Image: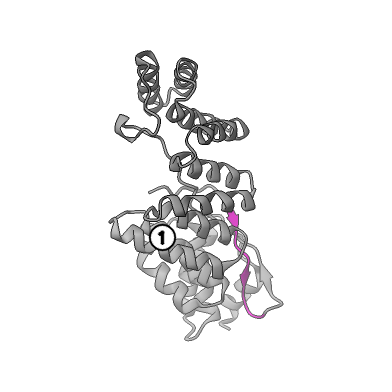
Amino acid sequence: MRRNLSVFFTITVLLFSACSTVEPTATSTPPKLILKTEEKDVYCPSDNEQAREAYNKAKELSIQTKQIEAERLCRQAIELDPKYCDAMDNLGLLLRRQGRIEEAIVWYKKSLAVFPDNTVAIQNLAVAYRLQGKSDEAIAEYEKLTPVAPDNPEGYFGLGSTYLDLQRPEQAITYLKRAEELYIQNNSPYVVDTQYYLGFAYYLLQDCQKAKAYLEPIYSQLDEDGGINYVLGACYIISEPKDLEMARKYIFKAQELGVEIPVDLLKALENGK
């Protein structure tokens, strides 16, 4: 799974009326980054043997988390073959891992100048923009990805999760459902991430029935996630039939995990209303 406790978006939740809003912090799925690990996956195979050797050694070192040396070898491969777009892609990823996102963007763009339909560069460029908070730019790249790779769920997942960042759940759901279909077809574990996002999207639409339908089946895999506990707990308070026992279970767990619980919600639990 690619989930961790990094915060990538803030969910605005509607509790008891349209005028009552709170903004708890929710953990989320970080965007997926791609590292090419097999020579057969390359888009721009190099005829330069030294460049290939540097590229393959860089991959090995990257797996060993020796990022600085891997970066040096990627640059060497590009110097030896200036059209080696795959080395550019991996260099971009190495730079992004070091927090050098702007530099990574430069190399993804250079890669795309060599091979415009490079899905790895398109996707990772979208990821880099999203990490910078440039949602419009990220969406534009994901929209390029889906026509080039219509059976790749990552473009739809990226669009859905970015629209959720923007609190536009209706649009998010359209793309997330398509991503879910493709992940299921591929028997991918990432389907859980998509269902997590779908649960949040329906919650933003105040459709707790569908939110719970997505989140409860995956809860056992994500029980240490503050966001899923918060949403399930809130749903057991604000939707019928109410179940305060279940609400307390989830809300107190969310609180333990560091989610700030709104005062109105805690009062509802205390007063049984």
Using the rendered view, name the quadrant where residue 22 is placed: bottom right
Task: Give the percent coordinates (x, y) of residue 232.
Answer: 48, 70
Task: Please state the extent of the stretch shown in magenta in the rendering.
Answer: 8-17
Instruction: Please indicate, yes or no, whether residue 8 appears anywhere in the rendered image.
Output: no
Magenta segment's dominant SS is loop
Residue located 42% across and 67% down the image: 215
Task: Give the percent coordinates (x, y) of residue 38.
Answer: 31, 32
In depth, the one of 135 and 120 nearer the eye is: 120
Residue located 51% across and 50% down the image: 144
- Quadrant (top left/top right/bottom left/bottom right) for the C terminus: bottom right
Q: Amino acid at mark 1?
A: Ala
Specify how the rendered protein is coloured. one colour
Q: Is residue 25 left or right of residue 228?
A: right
Instruction: Please indicate, yes or no, whether residue 265 appears anywhere in the rendered image.
Output: yes
Considering only vertical position in the picture, is 2 above or below 161? Answer: above
Task: Give the percent coordinates (x, y) of residue 8.
Answer: 57, 51
User: Extreme bottom residue here?
Assistant: 241
In depth, the one of 183 and 216 nearer the eye is: 183
Residue located 64% across and 48% down the image: 133
Using the rendered view, name the quadrant where residue 171 is placed: bottom right
Q: Which residue is mark 1?
A: 179
Q: Give the class, few, some or many, for how many residues have Cα within 10 Å of label 1's Cα (few <14, many ≥20).
A: many
